[in-house]
């Protein structure tokens, strides 16, 4: 059995002192970019593994933050996690990510785990639906908390997306092309994104003087659910939609599969607007008109809110950052015939 690699071994490999290695690994004190690079390269080369228990006892800090998502299978959540992780690593913190799979009991279990492991904060996209405020596990969270796109009644800071305004503008754009049969597929209105998307849809219809048709609106349980059956039902109706707003990456994928099975061409037979990031639609054919949010801006806002808390730069009431959704025109929308 090989001997355990020590900080002294890393210092020797990097050609620096043990104190310098400690400063780099604990992100305390000054170390030049060149020295940090040498230490990090030596850590990789030697296979050094920090003793986190000893670090807790020595510094009282774990330099780790939890990240709870509803389902990492959602491509947008995976992209958001990656962007936040990059920001936090630059600041000297590691992220521990886990999925709750939309189970409030699991969220409570994960929060207890993070607190017991002495993590320094929690990023979360809570999946709890229609739960009384007293039952939200985030109400009792003792760690600095940043929520993404949720309006839970708790003491966490929030980074929100302006879904209502974005979807309203998407509806009005389609109406300006002559569309009156505008369908929408989105996540459940029991959580903030679904609720605000539905409000924006209705607001856009009202502004365009279009009466809402309940048969053109399907709010699914989750943004990663299949919607192929709902789309096929709409396309097979006597008055099918001429335009679609699909508000989720998996939702859009399922809708397009169903539309193509029905012999529908985009944009000739159906105009389509999706939602996501620029990378989500890089290979779309035709290039997709979409509601896009800047995932790096969201990550930066969340990281700044968290770092202010855990570095004791701010201890006031919860703060909120709201980011817009931009309507980016592609080639997937066409004036109605």
Image: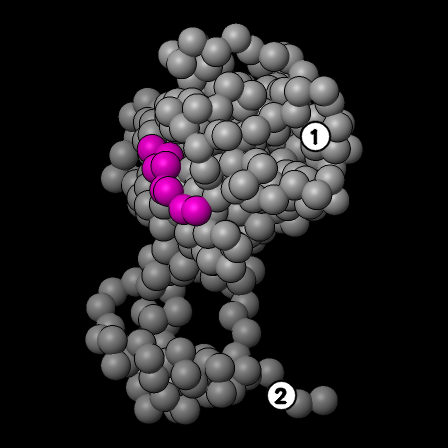
Q: Which residues are magenta?
A: 324-331
Residue 46 percent location from the top left of the image: 51, 87
Q: Residue furthest front?
A: 337
Q: Nearer the viewer, residue 88 or 165?
A: 165
Q: Is residue 327 above or below residue 217?
A: below
The answer to if 173 sits in the magenta stretch is no
Q: Secondary structure at mark 2?
A: loop
Q: How is the image coloured?
A: one colour
Q: Is residue 102 above or below residue 178?
A: below
Badge 2 or badge 1: first in the primary sequence: 2
Q: Marks 2/1: CA distance? A: 66 Å
The crowding category of the residue bearing disc 2, from other C-alpha atoms within 10 Å (few below 14, some 14 to 19, many at least 20), is few
- The overriding secondary structure of the stretch rendered in magenta is loop
Q: What residue would you read off at disc 1?
A: 235
Residue 275 percent location from the top left of the image: 49, 39
Task: Residue at 51% x, 19% y: name it.
Answer: 180
Q: Nearer the viewer, residue 101 or 249?
A: 249
Q: What residue would you read off at disc 2?
A: 3
């Amino acid at each position: 059995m090989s001997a355990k690699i020590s900080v002294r071994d890393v210092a020797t490999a990097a050609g620096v002192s043990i104190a310098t290695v400690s400063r780099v690994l604990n992100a305390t004190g000054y170390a030049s970019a060149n020295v940090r690079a040498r230490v990090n390269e030596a850590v990789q080369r030697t296979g050094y593994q920090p003793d986190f228990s000893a670090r807790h006892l020595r510094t009282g800090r774990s330099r780790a933050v939890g990240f709870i998502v509803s389902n990492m299978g959602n491509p947008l959540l995976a992209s958001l996690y990656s962007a936040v992780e990059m920001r936090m690593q630059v600041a000297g913190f590691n992220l521990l990510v886990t999925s709750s799979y939309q189970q409030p009991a699991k969220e409570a279990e994960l929060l207890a785990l993070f607190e017991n492991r002495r993590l320094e904060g929690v990023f979360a996209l809570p999946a709890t639906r229609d739960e009384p405020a007293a039952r939200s596990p985030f109400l009792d969270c003792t760690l600095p908390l940043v929520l993404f796109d949720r309006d839970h009644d708790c003491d966490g800071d929030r980074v929100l997306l302006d879904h209502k305004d974005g979807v309203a503008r998407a509806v009005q754009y389609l109406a300006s092309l002559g569309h009156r049969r505008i369908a929408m597929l989105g996540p459940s209105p029991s959580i903030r994104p679904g609720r605000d998307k539905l409000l924006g849809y209705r607001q856009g219809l009202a502004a365009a003087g279009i009466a809402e048709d309940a048969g053109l609106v399907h709010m699914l349980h989750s943004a990663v659910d299949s919607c192929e059956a709902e789309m096929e039902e709409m396309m097979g109706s006597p008055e099918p939609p001429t335009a679609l707003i699909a508000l989720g990456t998996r939702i859009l994928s399922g809708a397009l599969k169903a539309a193509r099975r029905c012999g529908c061409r985009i944009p000739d037979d159906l105009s389509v607007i999706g939602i996501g990031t620029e990378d989500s639609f890089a290979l779309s054919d035709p290039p997709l008109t979409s509601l896009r949010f800047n995932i790096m801006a969201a990550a930066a806002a969340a990281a700044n809110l968290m770092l202010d808390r855990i570095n004791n730069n701010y201890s006031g009431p919860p703060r909120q950052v709201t980011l817009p959704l931009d309507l980016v025109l592609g080639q997937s929308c066409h004036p109605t015939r």
